[in-house]
Amino acid sequence: MFKSRVFIVEYVCSITGAVIFTFYQDICSVF
């Protein structure tokens, strides 16, 4: 249970990081 929970947290964090990174690239391309 604990391991699966950690896996879910890492999965969500990786998705959030990818979204923020893409959003950051879009901002940089605008300026």
Image (tube, helix red, strand yellow):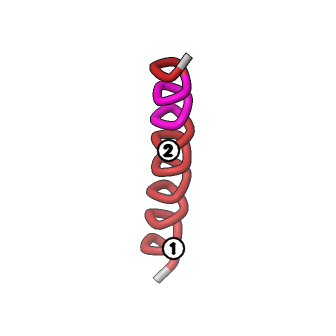
Q: Which secondary structure, mark 1?
A: helix
Question: Which residue is found at the position 56% from the left and 16% from the top?
Answer: 1
Numbered circle sitting on residue 5: none
Question: Could you say where residue 31 lies in the image, as x and y percent from the top left?
Answer: 46, 83
Query: Which residue was labeled with disc 2?
Result: 13
The residue under label 2 is which amino acid type? Cys
Q: Look at discs 1 and 2 and give the one toward the viewer.
A: 2
26 or 17: which is nearer to us?
17
1 or 27: which is nearer to us?
1
Q: Distance between the residues labelled 1 and 2?
A: 21 Å
31 or 16: which is nearer to us?
16
Around disc 2, counting alpha carbons within 10 Å, would you say few (fewer than 14), some (14 to 19), or many (20 or more)?
A: few
> What are the residue bounds of the magenta stretch?
5-11
Q: Does the magenta stretch include residue 2?
A: no
Question: Which residue is found at the position 54% from the left and 62% from the top?
Answer: 23
- Check the image and report above or below for 8 versus 29: above
Which quadrant of the view contains residue 25?
bottom left
Query: Which residue was labeled with disc 1?
Result: 27
CB contact under 8 Å: marks 1 and 2: no
- Check the image and report above or below for 5 versus 30: above
- Check the image and report above or below for 20 versus 6: below
Question: Which residue is found at the position 45% from the left and 70% from the top?
Answer: 29
In the rendered structure, the answer to whether residue 6 lies left or right of residue 8 reads left
Around disc 1, counting alpha carbons within 10 Å, would you say few (fewer than 14), some (14 to 19), or many (20 or more)?
A: few
**Residue at far bottom of view:** 31
Question: Could you say where residue 4 lies in the image, as x and y percent from the top left?
Answer: 52, 18
The residue under label 1 is which amino acid type? Ile
